[in-house]
Image: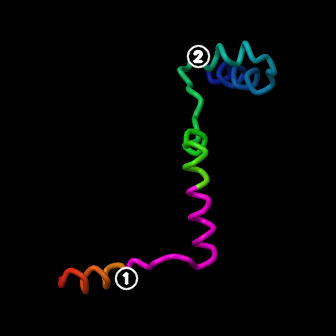
Amino acid sequence: MDIAVKYKIISEIISSNDDQILNAVKSLLNIEDEVDFWDELSPEDQAAINEGLEQLDKGQYVSHQSVREEIKSRFNF
């Protein structure tokens, strides 16, 4: 197919506001909507993640190194 025709198709798609046409093109090209993983999380999971991020911002966390040291001392590794 001629490149000029491809550019014309792209131009028409970009300038179109017709949802029916755009959905038809999307269907023909097998384009699926990308879903943000955040939107698939439950409100409880989102709240827990936000709480954890707030704790990190406040410096309320346990470092990897301190956990390793505690495990070594507790289990004699």
Looking at the image, residue 62 sits to the left or right of residue 18; the answer is left
Looking at the image, residue 38 sits to the left or right of residue 17; the answer is left
How many neighbours does mark 2 have within 10 angstroms: few (below 14), some (14-19), or many (20 or more)?
Answer: few
SS class of the residue under badge 2? Answer: helix
Please provide percent x and percent y for residue 23.
Answer: 67, 17
Q: Which residue is mark 1?
A: 65
Q: CA distance from mark 2 to mark 1?
A: 51 Å
Tag 1: residue type?
Answer: Gln
Q: Quadrant of the N terminus?
A: top right
Magenta stretch containing residue 67, yes or no? no
From the viewer's side, name the closer residue of 16 and 39: 39
Magenta stretch: give its range: 48-64
Q: Could you tell me which residue is drawn at 27 percent across and 79 percent down?
A: 71
Looking at the image, residue 73 sits to the left or right of residue 31; the answer is left
Which of discs 2 and 1 lies nearer the camera? The answer is 1
From the viewer's side, name the closer residue of 40 and 45: 45
The colour scheme is rainbow
Please provide percent x and percent y for residue 41.
Answer: 55, 43
Instruction: Indicate whether 3 appears above or below 63.
Output: above
Instruction: Indicate whether 66 appears above or below 32.
Output: below
Q: Earlier in the sequence, mark 2 or mark 1?
A: 2
SS class of the residue under badge 1? Answer: helix
User: Where, by quadrant of the figure, is residue 54 drawn?
Assistant: bottom right
Q: Could you tell me which residue is drawn at 81 percent across and 25 percent down?
A: 15
Marker disc for residue 27? 2
Looking at the image, residue 58 sits to the left or right of residue 16; the answer is left
Marker disc for residue 18? none
